[in-house]
Amino acid sequence: MMRKQKPVQDSFVRMTELVLPNDTNTLNNLMGGRMMHLMDVAAAISAQRHSNRIVVTASVDNVSFREGIKLGSVVTLEAQVTRAFSSSMEVHIDVWAEDIPSGTKIKSNEAFFTFVAVDQSGRPIDVPDAMPETPEEVHLYEGALRRRQLRLVLAGRMKPSDATELRAYFALGE
C-alpha cells in the first residue's frame, strides 16, 4: 500500500519573536538554550503540520551560533519538513536576526531536527511521504537520506558499512 503524500510546503512555519531582557545572557545576547527552545517549537509545529500527529524530538544536528543576537532584535525562524521516513521526519530550520533600527538582517543559525510521530500511547506511527516541489526543496530532500544515515551511524544504530548513501557520497570501500 502506498503511503499518503503531502507537499513539503504544507509544513512551512514562520515564527517571530522579540529578544527581551529575560531571554539574554550577561552580554545582552540571546541565550543559546532559549534559541534551541524556539527552534524546537518551530520545528515541532512543522512536523505536526506534516504528520497531523503528536511529535517528539528525536535528534538535533549540529547547531552553530554564527552571530550573537542582541537584546531588542527580532528573531524569525522558518521551518519545513525536508523528508519523511516511516514514522520520522527531518525538519530544516533557518534563523534570521533583524535589527530594525539599523535595517540589518542576518542569518544567525541553521539546523536539522528529527521528529517521530507517535500515537496516544507514545508508539511511533506512520507519516505521509514528503513531496518536494521547488529546486531548494528537492536539494534538501535528496540530502536527507545521507544526513539520516550519518545520524544513525553516529548514534550507534547503524553500521558504517550499511550506510549506502554515505559510502556512495565518500566513495568508501573502493
Image (cartoon, rainbow, N blue to C red):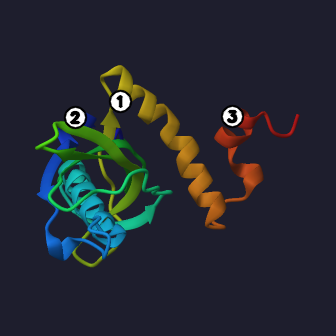
- Mark 1: which secondary structure? helix
- Mark 2: which secondary structure? helix
Question: Do labels 2 and 1 touch, CB within 8 Å?
Answer: yes
Residue occupying the point 44% across, 61% down: 60
Q: CA distance from mark 3 to mark 2?
A: 27 Å
Residue occupying the point 35% across, 29% down: 137
**Residue 128 in the image: x percent, y percent?**
29, 45
Q: Is residue 140 left or right of residue 149?
A: left
**Pointer 1: what residue?**
137
- Mark 3: which secondary structure? helix
Query: Which quarter of the rendered picture does the C terminus lie within?
Result: top right
**Pointer 2: what residue?**
9
Query: Which quarter of the rendered picture does the N terminus lie within?
Result: top left
Indicate whether 113 appears above or below 107. Answer: below
Return the residue nearer the eye: 76 or 164: 76
Q: Residues within 10 Å of mark 1 (few under 14, many from 20)?
A: some
Q: In which image quadrant can residue 70 be found?
A: bottom left
Q: Amino acid at mark 2?
A: Gln
Indicate whether 70 appears above or below 99. Answer: below
Mark yes or no: residue 4 visible. no
Q: Amino acid at mark 1?
A: Glu
Specify the farthest residue to the right.
174
Q: CA distance from mark 1 to mark 3?
A: 20 Å
Q: CA distance from mark 2 to mark 1?
A: 9 Å
**Residue 120 in the image: x percent, y percent?**
21, 75
Residue 169, which numbered label?
Answer: 3
